[in-house]
Image (cartoon, helix red, strand yellow):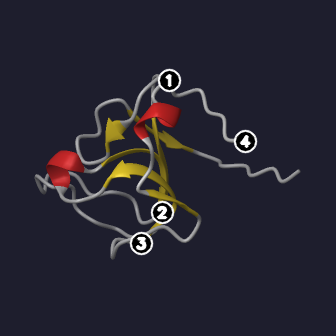
Amino acid sequence: MLAATWTDFAAEGQDFFQIQGGGNYGRHWFINRSYGGCPVDVGWLVVNGSSELTCDGSTRVPAVSIMYAMGTTLRNWNEYTNVGVADVMAVFVR
């Protein structure tokens, strides 16, 4: 069973839900809804493993960052509006 505090998580579906991530941008622990360019690149959690510029070129993402959708719904990774950056990520296996 999957559970999350995001209210749209179950209804939206995911195009990526995997540890190894996807694409060519060094994204791992990738829980994403839509992946296909800046306007539609939205999701819930990503561990970014590369230093890259945002779509508008004004902000560089740290070489390793844990980004998550703040609030109750998915977020566009490239807008950095309501996207949090975590200091620590813990994984528990039961």
Name the element at disc 1. Answer: loop
Q: Pointers 1 and 4 in contact (CB under 8 A)?
A: no
Name the element at disc 2. Answer: loop
Q: Which residue: 45% across, 23% down?
A: 71
> Residue 60, labelled with which disc?
none
> Residue 64, labelled with which disc?
2
Circle 2 packing at 10 Å, graded few (<14), some (14-19), many (20+), is few
Q: Which residue is mark 1?
A: 7
Q: Which residue: 41% across, 37% down?
A: 12
Distance between mark 2 and mark 3 Cα atoms: 9 Å
Q: Earlier in the sequence, mark 3 or mark 4?
A: 4
> Residue 26, labelled with which disc?
3
Distance between mark 1 and mark 4 Cα atoms: 15 Å
Q: Position of residue 20 (x, y in %)?
A: 55, 71
> Residue 1, labelled with which disc?
4
Q: Nearer the viewer, residue 1 or 36?
A: 1
Q: Earlier in the sequence, mark 4 or mark 2?
A: 4
Q: Nearer the viewer, mark 3 or mark 4?
A: 4
For the residue marked with disc 4, what is the amino acid?
Met
Distance between mark 2 and mark 1 Cα atoms: 27 Å
Residue 26 found in image quarter:
bottom left
For the residue marked with disc 2, what is the amino acid?
Val
Q: Earlier in the sequence, mark 1 or mark 4?
A: 4
